Each structure stands twice: as C-alpha cells, then as structure tokens.
Image (tube, rainbow, N blue to C red):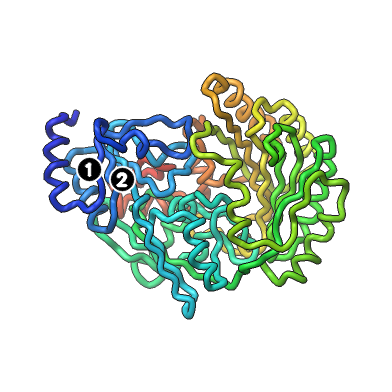
Amino acid sequence: MMSTSSLANAVTELAKTFTGQLLQPTDAGYEETRKVHNGLVDKRPALIARCRGVADIVEAVHLARTLNLAVAVRGGGHNVAGRATVDGGLMLDLSLMKGIHVDPKMRIARAQGGVTWGEFNRETQLHGLATTGGVVSTTGIAGLTLGGGIGWLMGKYGLALDNLTSVQLITADGRPLRVSEDENADLFWAVRGGGGNFGIAASLEYRLHTVGPTITGGLLCYPLHAARDVLRRFREVATSAPDDLRLAASLVGAPDGSGTKVAAILACHCGALTDGAAAVRPLKAFGHPIMDTIGPMRYCELNAMLDEAYPKGALNYWKSHFLPDLTDAAIDTMVDAFERCPSPMSEILLERFHGAAARVGIGDTAFPLRSVGYNFLAASQWMSPADNEPCIAWARETYTAMQPFVGLGRYVNYLDHDESEDPVAAAYGPNYRRLQELKAKYDPSNFFHMNQNIKPMV
C-alpha cells in the first residue's frame, strides 16, 4: 500500500514542473472536483491531477506508474458507470484542456480532451460546420467519441468516431503518439470504439460537414395514454426516414417539470429547411400533441435541448441493449414498464440506428454495432438517495422484461458498473479478440483498466 508520505513527496516533486492543479483530499477544490455527473458515484481519489497540456498528462502517467496507482481518466465526466474516477488512485482530469481550433477551409477541427460538445459546436457553428456529437451538450467529446458517439447527425454522417481523422494519444508507458489511418493505424482502429483502453486522448481531430446554423428539429409530446400509437407512428416514420432525418422516441416526464408522464418523438433534419419540413410532416400531422416544438431552430439549441433533463448530480442507473426491431409486443412491454416508473426524472429511450452509421463494416472500426435498429435505454434518474432501491429496481426489471426483444450488440458507453455477465466481450462481438491482441501490444499490464475494460490477450 502506498504511504501518505510517499504520495506527498511525489506530489511535491511533480509540482515543480506541473502546470495544472494537483489536488489531495485536504486541498481546497478537491471535494467539488472529485464529483462526476452521476451523483450515485461517490469515489475519493488519492490525487487529482488537473492537466493543462500533454506534458502534464505524461508526467501524471509516470507518477501513477511509480506509485502503482490505479488511473481513471476524466474528460466530461458523464459516463454513467463512474469510470472517470477511482477510490484511492489517480484521477487524471482533462477538464481544464479546452483548446479548439477550427480550419473552415479544410473542414477539420482539433479539440483537446476536456472539451464538451456544447463548446465544440459553438466554435464550429461560427462557420456553419459540425460533426456528429452528443445529444446532451455538457457531455465530453473524448469519452463519447472513443466509445462510439451516438448523435443527431449519425444518419447522414455516421457516428462521432466515424468522423475522427486522428487522435493524439498518451500510451500506458507515457508516450505521446499520433494515431491516424497512416500513423499507428492499428491503434487508430482500436481507439474508434475501444474507449479508454488504449491511452489518454489529449486531443482529437474531426472531419466537419456543412450543417445549419439553422436546421429542422425539436420534439413532439403526447399524453401517455396515446403512447402505443405514438411509438408505432415513430416506427413507421423511422423505418423510411432519409439519412438527413434522425429520430428518437421517449417515454418521459413532461418537459414542464410537472412530472406528468408523456410519450415524445425527437427529431433532427440536418439538410435544407424545405426538405426538413417535408420530412417531419408525417410526424407533425399525427394525433393531438400537447407540445410541438419541431421547426426551424439553431443546431446549437438542438444540442442543448435535453440538458436540463440530465442535471449534474442527479442519481443515475441505466440499463441498455439493442433492438433489431420495434415490435408491437416490445412497445406494449415498454409502456407497461413506464407506467410503473417511480421517478418523474426517469425515461425509456429509443435511439434509431440507420443511414451512414449502419453502412460501415463491422470490422472497419472497433465499434461493431452497425445494424439498422433501435438502441433501447432504461434511464433511471432521481434526486434523493432514499429512492435508490425502487429506482434501481425499476431499471433492472424493465431491462429484464425487454430481454425477449433484444438482439446482438450493446452500446458500450451505456454499460453500467454491475453487469452480471461479461458485457464488454458481448459489446465488441467479433472485434473483441483483435482488441485483446492490441491491448496486449500497447498496454500489456492493463494499466488503463478503470474503463469498460478489454483485458489483454494472454
């Protein structure tokens, strides 16, 4: 076990060159900095290294190796399983690394690992450009991208990882490497879906596309008694949707905060406004919505539309799987489960996979979930620890009830901390063995293991 004096001496030595902040449990700012987005996660690192640049990251990695500290890497801190922090180890915090450079002529943006999607979009939208990013603007770009990258533009432009052109990666032995199609190509394949298993993403470079600034988007809300018909209409429109139109559906508490349970359809059309109006017409003409905000809106507004529904500090427990089809029986099961939901902050979410995201080969990147279908998520969320038991139980029961309808594959970014099987192997499917081989090549001691861990091939 590492002694307190050993850590103190090492921190004193590191502080001579470290340009960021080094926080121990008794330091001002430690308590706030150690918190991640999910309030259910309550871990206390022995040291938080708040890096400002690549040299800080490298020195923090060497410190962790010297002291044999487990390392967790924090970008945006949104991962529901709490992989961004660690008890008694080193939290390597990138949240101070906010640099963003946009080259509008080349349609490329490079951003540091602490950038959030709201910050990224704000810069790229100055030029009418964007890439596929998270649907909650406070989510970090690094974690979301390396684990897949579901977002509003995925039907037209693929997942966030499909738009990566290079990553500056700090490996387990403290080497800064550029990984791309023509440099360390095997590692570039692995990081596009392999999460934080292969190194720390100091910066990421993305391909940009002409989007907005005004697009067609928003949501429709209906009373819960219409939920079955709403989800069937969602299925009908989603099945024939063009690549430009990305849809999701949700059983959720009303956006007005009343706690009233509603059925909602969320839409984003990233093409011309006239095409967008035509594409969403079958949705807007359906039934008797109690709220309809679908229309022209700024892309940045769309990306922040759901932020208030996912407040920092709320307690979260998620269960997710992939549905190849949305059958009537699956719809009935979801509606029945949501009627029993104990928290007005919880939801059942269906995220449509189609278009460009589903046309990439399973083995072309480490991320193998390339089928047309629906990502199902039971997102239990609440505020009081007194409600932990019923809210966690609801998510588990809902997930169990949905098992007859699930297919192969799971979205690794949604995996929680207490899966009973080996969900990581299942999530990577036919790509898992190659990932294990690359893990053995680049991180044979499994230094980066505070993640959805891929164990090295032995």
Give residue 295's quadrant in the image: bottom right
Residue lying furthest bottom: 105
Q: Name the residue under label 2.
A: 92
What is the secondary structure assignment of the residue under circle 2?
Answer: strand
Q: In this view, does 251 lie above or below 278?
A: above
The residue depicted at 13 percent of the width and 34 percent of the height is: 6
Q: Mark 1 points at which residue?
A: 64
Q: Residue 2: image x %, image y %?
A: 18, 31
The label on residue 113 is none
Q: In this view, does 86 lie above or below 408?
A: above
Tags 1 and 2 touching, CB below 8 Å: yes
Any part of residue 187 in sight:
no
Give residue 318's quadrant in the image: top right
Q: How far apart are marks 1 and 2 (CA)?
A: 10 Å
Q: Residues within 10 Å of mark 1 (few under 14, many from 20)?
A: many
Q: Residue 108: image x %, image y %?
A: 46, 72
Left or right relative to 368: residue 277: right
